[in-house]
Amino acid sequence: MAPALRTELHLSLGQTGLLISGSLVGSVVSLIPWGLAADRVGERWVLASGVGGCGLALLAASRVNGFWTLLALLSLAGALGASVQSASGRAVMQWFPPRQRGLALGIRQTAIPLSGFLVSLAMPPVVHAGGVAWGFASLGLACFAGAVVGVLVLREGPEREDAPELADLSPFRDRRLWTLSLGSALVLAPQLCVGGFTVIYLHEGHGLSTGHAAAVLAVTQALAVGGRIAAGRWSDVAASRIGPLRRIALGAAALVALTAALTSAPLGLLVPALVAAGVLSMSWNSLSFAAAVELAGHGRSGLAIGLQQPFLNLPGAAYPALFGVLVAATSWRAAFFAVALFPLAGWRVLRPLAV
């Protein structure tokens, strides 16, 4: 929807980045309360009420055309929809033992690239037919459908005993969780900047139509589904979440740097590098989720996710806007090279947890 938003609302690249970040901004203030609620009342109604409210906010967004009002509604949608993070993560923690949890969370995390794949294909014709109003309305209706599914299928999992050393340790006082959150926040940068700007970059920087550029993003999202499942299974086999996460961070840094080096190359060389960078940068999230809930224990898994996610969403809200400003001030090449430094820094920050 980004090119249509720029055209209809006459937005700068920086303003477009702020709208892309809007839902993450809202979630920063709500994730810890949602996590506490999931631990106390269970994930079923937390997910249903939050995602249903997100749908209402998106329907309201379809009726406005002012930048600040739209940003406020997208932030509200993010604050309400953030319930899905703690609720669905806690559900996996409750239902699956450690030897299966990486794969289970990897499958759960495929929701993001899978929906990205579907939206990349469906949104251009929807927006072409009815503008961004139809685009936001369709997203709102999808959220209503998700809330209904949550009510119908989610149930509380069996209670599991935590290790004795976790019984009295609050996630707020666990330095390992803070280190994991900071490192993951750094590894996140390519996921938002490469994925969030693929369509605009190929459309404005290389002259591809919006539909063809969206098709490249759709391929990236489709391959990322397999990437997340494979990364989760890898962590189960390795009996480690941090080791695979650090290796993925190094690979993502290398591929984003390669994309930067190929910005002036023919599309036959650039697009495969861009897709590979996008796939790898989207493949690691389940490993960070699994590490967080395993550090905190079952009884505090909702809170652990609620505490970790603001660390991801706060910089995540800033990355697209800053990336857009950096592109406008320098070039796509310089901006991609800058993004490649973040997962490299995350690899270094996570090193103590790999021991």
Image (cartoon, rainbow, N blue to C red):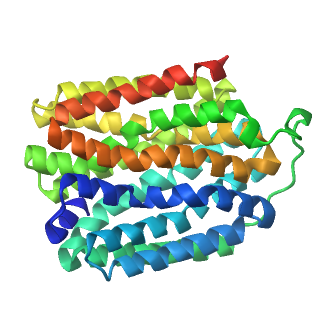
Q: Quadrant of the N terminus?
A: bottom left
Q: Is residue 267 left or right of residue 187?
A: left
Q: Is residue 237 left or right of residue 227?
A: right
Q: At 16% across and 46% down in the image, what residue appears?
A: 202
Q: At 48% across and 76% down in the image, what residue appears?
A: 55
Q: At 88% across and 33% down in the image, what residue appears?
A: 165
Residue 220, horizontal then vertical, whole percent: 33, 45
The answer to whether residue 219 shows anywhere in this view is: no
Q: Say which of 91 and 186 sits in front.
A: 186
The answer to whether residue 55 shows anywhere in this view is: yes
Check the image and report above or below for 40 versus 208: below
Q: Quadrant of residue 276?
A: top left
Check the image and report above or below for 347 versus 83: above
Q: Say which of 315 and 8 sits in front.
A: 315
Q: Quadrant of residue 7?
A: bottom left
Residue 240, horizontal then vertical, whole percent: 66, 26
**Total number of numbered discs in the rendering:** 0
Check the image and report above or below for 131 versus 83: below
Q: At 71% across and 56% down in the image, what residue appears?
A: 91
Check the image and report above or below for 307 versus 132: above
Q: Quadrant of the C terminus?
A: top right
Residue 244, horizontal then vertical, whole percent: 56, 26
Q: Is residue 246 left or right of residue 278?
A: right
Q: Is residue 115 left or right of residue 233?
A: left
Residue 245, horizontal then vertical, whole percent: 54, 29
Q: Which residue of the protein is positioned furthest toward the top in this rendering?
A: 355
